[in-house]
Amino acid sequence: MARTRSFFTLTSLLLAGLSTAKYIVPGGRWHDTDGKLVNAHAGCVTVDKSTGKFWLFGEYKVEGQTEGGGVSVYSSSDLATWESHGLALAPVEDHPHIAPSSIIQRPKVVYSKVSKEYHMWWHADNSSYGLLLQGFARSPNISGPYTFVSATAPLGNWSQDLGLFTDYKDGRSYSLYSNGDRKEGRDVYITSYNEDTTGLEKVIHRFDKYDLEAPTIVQTDKSYYALMSHKTGYRPNNVVAFRADSLAGPWSQPFMVAPLNTRTFSSQSGFNLRIEGTKKTTDLYLGDQWDSNSLWESRYIWLPIDIDDKKKTLNLVWNDVYDLNVKTGEWSPVKGTAYYGKDAKTNGAAFKQEANFASQGTIVAGIAGNDSTVTFEGIEGTGKPQWVSFYYQNTDDLGFGDQPGGTPDRIGGAWQLRRIASVVVNGDTSKVETLFQRDTHKSIILSTPLLLTLVKGKKNTITVGGLYNGFDYKGADIDRIVVYPSEKS
Ligand SMILES: *[C@@H]1O[C@H](CO)[C@@H](O)[C@H](O)[C@H]1NC(C)=O
Ligand SMILES: *[C@@H]1O[C@H](CO)[C@@H](O)[C@H](O)[C@H]1NC(C)=O
Ligand SMILES: *[C@@H]1O[C@H](CO)[C@@H](O)[C@H](O)[C@H]1NC(C)=O
Ligand SMILES: *[C@@H]1O[C@H](CO)[C@@H](O)[C@H](O)[C@H]1NC(C)=O
C-alpha cells in the first residue's frame, strides 16, 4: 500500500516537472508556499544563472505600515510558485538610512561578476522624501542577508523612483531614476554603473522634463524600449514607452503600451523580465497594481509583452490566466468558460441595462448590498479551486483630472480607487469572498480574478453583491464571469 502511494507520488512529481504546475494570474491574490500573501512590491526578479531559479525582491508592507518594512525575497522555479526567504534587507533601528521610519523603495538586485556578490540598489529616503538618494547593500548569497554599504546622490543629483537595467549583449548595467518632483528635476536618467555595479560612471541619456517615473527598459535584438508611468501617486495611469536603437538615443516620442483608458490595466511599470527559452524569447511586464486604500494588499500585474520591431510598437497583452513554460519560453492563454450578465438572474434593485460596449449589449447595473445582486446559474465546476474572473465597469472616476496622465473625466472626483463586491458560491453566505473592483472609466470593462471552489458538476451558482468600501455599498456593474480550469498539480 505504502509502496503504491509513493510510486504515484513520484510519478506525479515527475509529471509536474515536465509541465508548468501553476498559472500566472495577473491581479489575483498570490499566495506563497506558506499560504501567506506574496509581499514584494515594486521590486525585481533576478535570475540565479547557476541554478536557473528566479528570485523576487520587493518592498515588504504590513497592514497599518506603508513604508520601512525592508526588502523581502522569494524564490521560484516557474514564476508562479513562490517560496518566502524572509527579509533580504531588514530595517535597523536608528539607522540613518534603513530605519523602520526610512523610505526603502523599488529595490533592484544584480549579480556582480567582479565581486562575485549580489548588489542591491534602491531609492533611499527619509519619510518626507527630502534626501532623494540611492541605497546600496551587498551579499555573497542571493537570498541575503544584505549588508548596508551606502546611500549616495547619483553624480550629485537627486534620485527618486529607481530601476535597473542590464544589457544582455554586453552584461553592462544601468541605473534608471527620476530626479524627483521639483521644478528643477522632473527628468529621468539612464546612467551607467561601473564594471562592479558599486557606483555610477556617467549619464548616457536624460529624458528631459517629461515628468515620468517608475522606469524600466525592455531590450530586443534591435531596440530598447524605456517604459515609464505618469505621476499619479498610488493611482494607476497610462504607462508610456520610448524606443531607440541605442541607449544614448535618439529616443522616439513616448507612446502608450496598453489600450487607452484602461490605465495600463490598473497598473504601474517598474520592472520586466526577459525569458530566453529553448523555443522562444518572452518578455514579461512586471507591474504593480497599487491599492492606496490598503497598500499591503497591492497586487501584481505580470503580462506578456508583444513587440514588433519593424513597426516599432510594444503592447502589453492582457490575459486573465496564462500558462508560461520558463524552459521553452512559450506561453499560452488558459481557456475559460464565460457566463454572461444577459443570461444571469437579477435580484432586488439590480437590473440589466443596455450597454453597446458590453458583452451581448447588456450589463448588470444597480448592484448593492446583500439584496440587490446578480446570480449566475448552471456553472460547471471541478470540485477543486479554480480561478474565476469577474468582468466589470466601475465609473466612480478617480478624480485626477488636474494631473498629467490622470482621468480627464472629473475635476476633484470621488478619489475612490475601488468598490468591493461580495461573491457567494452556491448560496453559502458563511463564506463571503471580497472582490476589489478598481475604477475603470465609463465603458471600460476590466477583470479581477478570485480563486473559488465550486462543486463538481454543472449546478453551481455565483452571486455578486456589494460590500462597504468606505463610502457606500455599491458594487460595480457586471458584464460577465469567466471560469477557468483548475491548475495542474
Ligand atoms: C528629510 O531630509 C531633508 C533634507 O535633509 C530635511 O530637510 C527634512 O526635514 C527631512 N525629513 C524628515 C522627516 O526628517
Ligand atoms: C544562502 O541562502 C539559502 C536560501 O535562503 C540558504 O539555504 C543558504 O544556507 C545560504 N547560504 C549562506 C552561505 O548563507
Ligand atoms: C539635478 O539635475 C537638474 C537638471 O536635470 C538640475 O537642474 C539640478 O540642479 C540637479 N540637482 C543637483 C542636486 O545636482
Ligand atoms: C448583509 O448581511 C449581513 C448579515 O447576513 C449583515 O450583517 C449586513 O449588515 C448586511 N449588509 C447590508 C448592506 O445589507
Image (cartoon, rainbow, N blue to C red):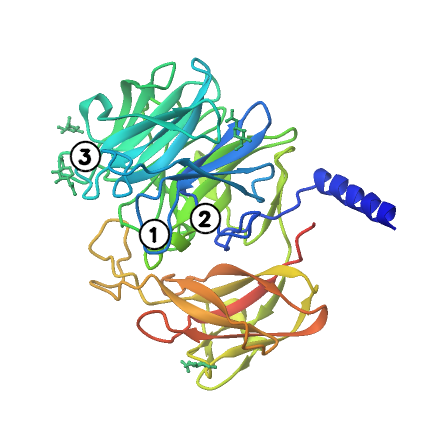
Nearest the eye: 452 or 65: 65
Q: Which mark is residue 300?
A: 2
Q: Residue at x 50, y 64 (%)?
A: 391
Q: Mark 3 is on which residue type?
A: Leu
Q: Is residue 286 left or right of residue 104?
A: right
User: In what element is the residue under mark 3?
Assistant: loop
Q: Residue at x 65, y 33 (%)?
A: 328
Q: Is residue 209 above or below residue 50?
A: below
Q: Residue at x 68, y 66 (%)?
A: 381
For disc 2, the neighbor class at 10 Å (few under 14, some 14 to 19, many from 20) is many
Task: Tell me the CA gap for discs 2 and 3.
Answer: 28 Å
Nearer-N-terminus badge (3/1): 3
Across and down, in percent, residue 78 comes to: 60, 39
The residue to which callout 3 is attached is 131
Q: Mark 1 is on which residue type?
A: Pro
Task: Tell me the CA gap for discs 3 and 1.
Answer: 25 Å
Q: Is mark 1 within 8 Å of ligand 3?
A: no
Q: Residue at x 24, y 65 (%)?
A: 413
Q: Nearer the viewer, mark 2 or mark 3?
A: 3
Q: Is residue 56 above or below residue 236?
A: above
For disc 1, the neighbor class at 10 Å (few under 14, some 14 to 19, many from 20) is many
User: In what element is the residue under mark 1?
Assistant: loop
Q: Is residue 106 above or below residue 372?
A: above
Across and down, in percent, residue 63 comes to: 36, 55
Q: Nearer the viewer, mark 3 or mark 1?
A: 3
Q: Is mark 3 within 8 Å of ligand 1?
A: yes
Q: Nearer the viewer, mark 1 or mark 2?
A: 2
Q: Which mark is residue 236?
A: 1
Q: Is residue 288 left or right of residue 29?
A: left
